[in-house]
Structure formats: structure tokens, C-alpha cells
Image (cartoon, helix red, strand yellow):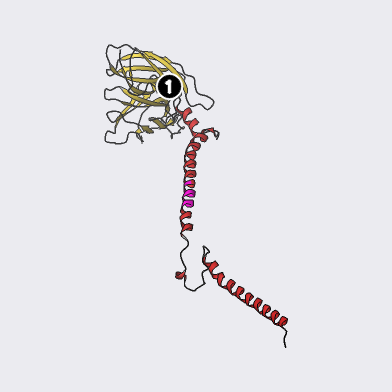
Amino acid sequence: MVSTELKRKIVLVALMLVVLFISAGCQSEETPGLRKTNLVERIPVTSTPTNLPTLPVPVLTDTPSILETRVEAAATTVERIVPSLSVVIPTNAPTIDPGPSPTATVRSFRLPSATPAPQLAKMRIVEPGPYSKVSSPIQMKALISPGDDGLVHVDLIGEDGRLMVSEVLDFHNYDAKNFYITPEIPFQIASAAELARLVVYTNDMFGQMISLVSVDVLLIQLGGSDLTPSQIEFEPYLVNTPREGSLIAGGTVVINGAARLVNNNPLIIELIDEKGVVVGTGEVQVSQPSDGVTHVPFQLSVPYSITHRVRVRLAIHQESATRIPGTVWMSSTILFLDP
């Protein structure tokens, strides 16, 4: 027989076990309830991505505001950099010292110079050269520019000043303004040899001389020619001012130019009107160039006397330094004069 006390203990133990079972059951039922209160629901993994739920709305609404702020900040940065580049480039460029620059060269080139740049002669005798021995006929080669009438005059002058040969070459059908010619100049002399001058010149529409070139040669009766080289390649007389066609008033023409004289005689400058009247004249002594200089600068004031506006030819020439008289070289330009 079980005692009453033992029975009581058994009943108490049984009651405690029951209480424990009931308590464990309550805890297992409350766990799912707690999961349902979470903001993010656990999502089972499946093989179809379309079954995934969309992200919560609060996450999407916050993202655009952050992106817009970052874009606006980037745009602000770009706007500040671009104008600074456009300002910095021109401002910093002048501070760079690259040494000699084309700008400096151009400025110095544009400064007025007392010495015009040398120019190739528009008319010159290439062959024969000075004091060549030539037999008849003279095989001449010359660079010429025909006159207003298209003609070129060729003269052979003897040592006593007589005109031995005079020929007129017609080039009025030629379109070229400057070209070479090779005429033959026959002559006859009574002595074995004679000094002579071969002259080539052109005239304008009024019969006034435009230019003249010459060379002294030795005519021989017998034997072959012995030629020397030409000594003139550049224009001997250069005029810087006044320019071709200038209108000048006041009674004086101031001439600035440069010369490489063909002999040691003075340089003579004349103002000749359309009728051949000399309305002004002057001369200047120019030294021979040296030290690699091709031409020596000169300046001359030529007074003139007129009563109304006239067209004149400014003629620059030198006279002979040998026993054959006459002009040995001449060039000219057109001016207009007012009283």
C-alpha cells in the first residue's frame, strides 16, 4: 500500500510535468507571431525571378533625392571649371617667354627702311660683258621690257661718238612684259680695233625715254669674239619714295633711294614733263657699296617750277666716264606735280 504522503508527491510531480509541457507549447506557438511583426519578410528561394516581391517603397523614394543632389553637385563643379579655363589660357600665354618670335620679326620688317630691297634689273645686257672683244656680227643677249609702243631700240656708238648702227626691234605683238632677246648687230670698222658702246633703250607714248642700258665693248676686225661676264644683275637705281604715281605739291620732290653706281660719276635726277621740258634737276654723289652691301642709300631734294598740275617722268641716270659721251644707264618712274 502506498502511503498517502507518497501519493501526494507523485501528484505534485505530475502536475509540474504538465505545467512544463503547457509552457513549452505556448512558446512554440508565439514564435510565428513575432516573425510577422518584422519589416522585411523572409523570402523563400525559388528558380523563377519573377516571383520576387518588389523592394519596399521607402527605399526607392529616398534614392532619387540622393542622386539628384550628387548630379547637381557635379554640374556645379563643371560650370566653375570651364569658365576658369577660358580665362586662364589667354591670361597665362603672354607671360611665357619663348625667345625670338615671328611677331618681333614682322614688326621689324614693317619699319620704314632707308634702303629698298635689291631688285633684279628689268633691262640689262647679258652678253657681251664689259670690254669684251667682239667681231661682226655682235651676238647680243639682253633682257628687255618693250616701251609703250612695243619697240626696243639698239644703237652701236663708235669711240668718236658717231652712230655706227641703229636698229628698231618691234615686239608690239608680244604679250610678255619682260623677256630675253638675241639679235645680231653687224658692224664695219676701218681700223683693226675700236672702242664702242652697245646701247639698248625704250620710249614712252610721248617719245620720252623710259630706260636705257649699255655696255662698252672692243670691236675687232679679225678673229673670234672673246666675251667677259656681265657685271650688272640688280637694278642699279632704286627709289623708295616717292612711289610711282604719287602727287606732290610744294615745289620740291624729296627722293629717298639707294644706288649701286655703274661708274664713279654723280647720280643725276631730272623731272621731265610730257613735252620733254626739264622742270627740275639735281645730282648727288653716292659712294660705291662695300662689306657685302649691294646698294648705298641716298637722299636728294629736287626743286621744280610749274604753273599747273603736270605729269612728269622722274629720270635717274649716269653719264659716261670714258671718251665715248652720252648716258650709260637710265631708269625712270611717273609722278604728278602740283605747284
**Residue 226 belongs to magenta span:** no
Helix, strand or loop at mark 1: strand
Q: Quadrant of the C terminus?
A: top left
Foreground residue among 56 and 327: 56
Residue 30 rendering spot, x and y as whole percentages: 56, 70
Question: Dot 1 corresponds to which residue?
Answer: 257
Q: Residue at x 54, y 70 (%)?
A: 32
Q: Quick one: quadrant of the N terminus?
A: bottom right
Q: Nearer the viewer, residue 247 or 286?
A: 247
Question: Mainly helix, strand or loop, the magenta region?
Answer: helix
Local crowd at mark 1 within 10 Å, few (<14), some, or many (≥20)?
A: many
Q: Name the image quarter holding residue 114.
A: top left
Most foreground residue, 113 or 333: 113
Region of the chain picked out in magenta, as a range: 65-72
Instruction: Confirm whether residue 290 shows in the render.
Output: yes
Query: Residue 26, how many percent across, how many down?
Result: 58, 72
